[in-house]
Amino acid sequence: MSDTFTKDLTGATPPARTQQPVVDCDIHPAYRSPDEMASYLPLRWQRHVADFGLHSPSPLIGALPYPRLAHGMRQDSYPPVGGPPASDLAFLQEQLLDPLNITHGILQPLSGGHGVLNHALGEALCAGTNDWQIERWMDPDPRLKGSIAVMQEDAPAALREIEARAKDKRFVQISVTPRTAEPAGHRRYWPIYEAAQALGLPISLHSAAFGARANTGAGWTSFYIEEHFAFSHAAQHTLVSLIFSGVFDAFPKLKVVLVEGGFAWLPPTVWRMEREFDRYRGEVPDLKRRPAEYVRDHIWLTTQPVEEPTRSSQLSDLIDWVGVDRLLFSTDYPHWDFDHPDFAFRVPLPPEDRAKLMHDNAVGVFGLT
């Protein structure tokens, strides 16, 4: 988040200074309480969770992933009526949607059953999360669009949930955690990609504190500062796996959105993939195209957290290298490193490029109207 915006915070979001319409591709709604989450589960699973809890490979389950940062939330984002940040629609509208001229907001629930070891419970949690998005958010405010939460470690369960939501066009993507039990390109996940392609829905891979694997290649981190830094790691290894495993040859119309992993890493990662492809392409002879070509046709990245060099001209260079048409603006509301659209890209951008980044790209990727 911009230092200028941080200094300007006085307890309320400043009004937008421009009339540029915005699509926010990363909004994190929250349950008012654990009881609200439980109310969207069948009684059988309510009793199970109450008696036995949620079992996950993550050591952070049952602990605070961000203990020093009030769960990683903006201090001014707690609703006046009580409850966690982003748990009250009226306050979210007042603080985010209305003043920032957000025409569409993509919900990215951090709940769901992505990392639960009991797959049947995970399926129920995903279904409950999707019902909750409809009832509490999308029905009351048409600007809000949903992400289909799926139990990606159980492809048949994921397909059942996708089929159940496919007719509701307010769901604009399928949500999968990038820290899957196996690399994202493995064929156990291909049925999900096939369904996404058939429906024209992007696959969203959101870096987060929880997942089926450790948050770095070296294991679980000791500090939040490491965890926050490592968000980009999950995005990178996911991208590499998808490309070299042949996912985009198998599904040539598949769209993938990498969420909250930054984007400054993309040019050097593509360079390394290109170099390795030249040296070892005999190991992957079935690939029909070069790595950079797959990235250009299949990959989009949300902007938060924006890497902000001291020299603004370097950010302009970075945007040129990545491609302004690959970037989707996001605020990451209500997290502490929230990006305000008036402050996140303080570099000279032609009006048409700013419109692409803030609005038009997302409209095309998600088929928004």
Image (cartoon, rainbow, N blue to C red):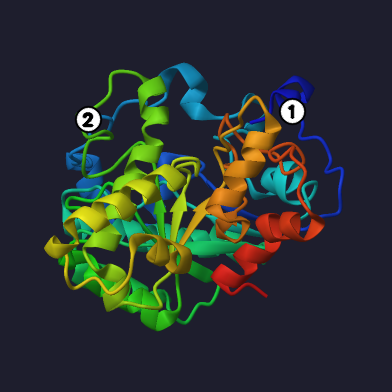
Q: Is residue 297 visible?
A: yes
Residue at (29, 47) in percent of width and height: 237
- In the displayed structure image, the side of residue 252 where residue 134 appears, left or right: right
Q: Quadrant of the N terminus?
A: top right
Q: Position of residue 96 (x, y in %)?
A: 71, 45
Q: Quadrant of the C terminus?
A: bottom right
Kindly identify which residue carries mark 2. 59
Residue at (63, 35) in percent of width and height: 314
- In the displayed structure image, the side of residue 64 where residue 341 appears, left or right: right
Q: Amino acid at mark 2?
A: Pro
Callout 2: few (<14), some (14-19), or many (20+) C-alpha neighbours within 10 Å?
few
188 vs 51: above or below: below
Callout 1: few (<14), some (14-19), or many (20+) C-alpha neighbours within 10 Å?
some
Q: Position of residue 239 (x, y in %)?
A: 33, 54
64 vs 350: above or below: above
In the figure, residue 148 lies in which quadrant?
bottom left
Q: Residue furthest front?
A: 279
> Viewer-nearest of labels 2 and 1?
1
Tag on residue 5? 1
Chain-order first, disc 2 or disc 1: 1
- In the displayed structure image, the side of residue 99 where residue 268 appears, left or right: left
**What is the CA distance from the residue labelled 2 to the residue labelled 1?**
34 Å
Q: Is residue 330 visible?
A: no
Residue at (59, 55) in percent of width and height: 328
367 vs 100: above or below: below
Q: Position of residue 128 (x, y in %)?
A: 38, 59
Q: Position of residue 235 (x, y in %)?
A: 37, 47
Q: Secondary structure at mark 2?
A: loop
